[in-house]
């Protein structure tokens, strides 16, 4: 066989690079594979093309062939020394390199999983932030073996079955030659090493479960569903691997006075009919009144109340907006406090009260009120345009 023959089989020039040779082989392999074309002559050509690629894809074999040597070690093109593995064929199809190392042993040391716990806090704590001490139950490094998984004084040893590779080859013979597949080693479960004397504390896993305490700082402005991430405070990984993260999911309890909408706070103040008519000033608490200073700390300078002016003639449903008295935002700023005035009409009057109200109605000419009727609901866009062009 001359130097040109193997290159001719693949249809490439003698100076073709490795990528060109691989592309040419993949194209021919798709055309000539027995599953695509079962013709005996085609199958024989597929063998020749595969063996040509085996030589030309290996730099050492290719160099020996170009120098006129026998790349098959004397076995010839049809000898037994030219086994071409099924793995190499699949690598050629999907872009791998023949003979390259595949998966290798599985690592015993792996990163741990993330953990999630839920924390109930009140509205003031969510608004202004708080520090809480938590009890968490997670996997930690085994203190007996230090995460190695072996009993004190012992260490993992290389697996004799796979010689540390973590996988073993299974070879079958077919008309294509030797078909070699790699499977995880059953003796070491793919780790490449065996623990002859596992740690009794962790049973060889390198970690044990333990309850521990940690302090979490909840930032100001969180809301129900917010998750606070604590890096490397989650589960320790197998083999004493690095821990995952711990996520604290916030659940905010309902407040008896304030309702939160985004960063705004809403509350309703009920005033008597007389106060709404005559006007008055009320002192109302703020959300800061719920803030509890840490033990041993001095009292804060937070404003725990504010004065709300009820103007004479205030109608039920009137809203008073206090700018910047809502909930601080996670990214800065602060919402508003919106107070809705509800005017309370008395349902029971004694004779004297009824007499006074009747007298007032007479003075105001309201003994027989007619009331006023206004259109309700929101007008459509076309309705508003019509009213704009037809004001009367």
Image (spheres, grey):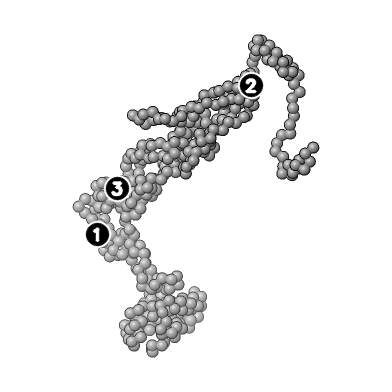
**Helix or strand or loop: what does disc 1 sit on?**
strand
Residue at numbered disc 3: 141
Tell me the CA gap for discs 1 and 2.
90 Å
Residue at left offset 25%, top offset 52%: 150
Say above or below: 11 vs 172: below
Residue 285 percent location from the top left of the image: 49, 27
Q: Earlier in the sequence, mark 1 or mark 2?
A: 1
Q: Which residue lies furthest to the bottom in this view?
A: 2
Nearer the observer, 126 or 96: 126
**Helix or strand or loop: what does disc 3 sit on?**
strand
Residue 40 percent location from the top left of the image: 48, 81
Task: For marks 3 and 1, give the one nearer the viewer.
Answer: 3
Please identify the quadrant where the N terminus is shown.
Answer: bottom left
- The quarter of the displayed image where residue 69 is located: bottom left
Tell me the CA gap for discs 3 and 1.
21 Å
Residue at left offset 48%, top offset 77%: 27
- In this image, 386 relative to 16: left or right? right
Q: Earlier in the sequence, mark 3 or mark 1?
A: 3
- The quarter of the displayed image where residue 210 is located: top left
Residue at left offset 34%, top offset 49%: 243
Q: Is residue 67 visible?
A: yes
Nearer the observer, 371 or 254: 371
Residue at numbered disc 2: 277
Say above or below: 188 vs 254: below
- In this image, 29 relative to 243: left or right? right
- In this image, 145 relative to 66: left or right? left
Q: Are marks 2 and 3 in contact (CB under 8 Å)?
A: no
Q: Are marks 1 and 2 in contact (CB under 8 Å)?
A: no
Residue 278 percent location from the top left of the image: 62, 20
Residue at numbered disc 1: 157
Residue at left offset 56%, top offset 30%: 339
How many residues crowd mark 2 within 10 Å: few (<14), some (14–19), many (20+)?
some
């Amino acid at each position: 066989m001359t130097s040109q023959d193997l290159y001719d089989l693949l249809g490439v020039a003698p100076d073709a690079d490795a990528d060109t040779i691989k592309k040419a082989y993949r194209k021919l392999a798709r055309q000539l594979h027995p599953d695509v074309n079962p013709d005996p002559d085609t199958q024989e050509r597929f063998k020749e093309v595969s063996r040509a690629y085996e030589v030309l894809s290996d730099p050492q074999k290719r160099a020996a062939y170009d120098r006129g040597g026998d790349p098959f070690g004397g076995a010839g093109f049809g000898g037994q020394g030219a086994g071409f593995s099924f793995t190499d064929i699949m690598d050629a199809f999907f872009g791998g390199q023949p003979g390259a190392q595949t998966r290798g042993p599985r690592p015993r040391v792996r990163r741990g999983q993330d953990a999630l716990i839920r924390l109930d806090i009140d509205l003031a704590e969510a608004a202004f932030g708080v520090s809480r001490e938590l009890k968490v139950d997670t996997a930690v490094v085994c203190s007996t073996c230090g995460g190695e998984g072996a009993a004190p004084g012992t260490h993992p040893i290389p697996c004799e079955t796979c010689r540390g590779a973590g996988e073993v080859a299974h070879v079958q013979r077919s008309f294509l030659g030797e078909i070699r597949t790699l499977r995880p080693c059953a003796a070491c479960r793919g780790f490449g090493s065996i623990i002859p004397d596992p740690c009794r504390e962790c049973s060889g896993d390198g970690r044990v479960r333990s309850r521990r305490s940690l302090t979490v700082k909840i930032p100001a402005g969180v809301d129900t569903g917010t998750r606070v991430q604590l890096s490397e405070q989650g589960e320790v990984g197998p083999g004493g691997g690095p821990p995952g993260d711990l996520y604290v999911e916030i659940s905010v309890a309902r407040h008896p006075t304030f309702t939160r909408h985004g960063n705004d706070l809403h509350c309703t103040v009920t005033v008597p009919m007389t106060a709404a008519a005559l006007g008055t000033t009320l002192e109302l608490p703020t959300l800061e009144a719920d803030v509890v200073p840490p033990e041993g700390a001095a009292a804060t300078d937070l404003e725990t109340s504010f004065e709300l002016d009820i103007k004479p003639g205030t109608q039920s449903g009137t809203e008073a907006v206090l700018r910047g008295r809502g909930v601080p935002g996670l990214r800065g700023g602060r919402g508003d406090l919106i107070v809705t005035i509800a005017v309370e009409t008395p349902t029971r009057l004694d004779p004297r009260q009824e007499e006074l109200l009747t007298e007032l109605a007479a003075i105001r000419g309201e003994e027989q009120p007619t009331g006023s009727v206004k259109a309700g609901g929101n007008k459509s866009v076309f309705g508003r345009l019509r009213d704009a062009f037809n004001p009367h």
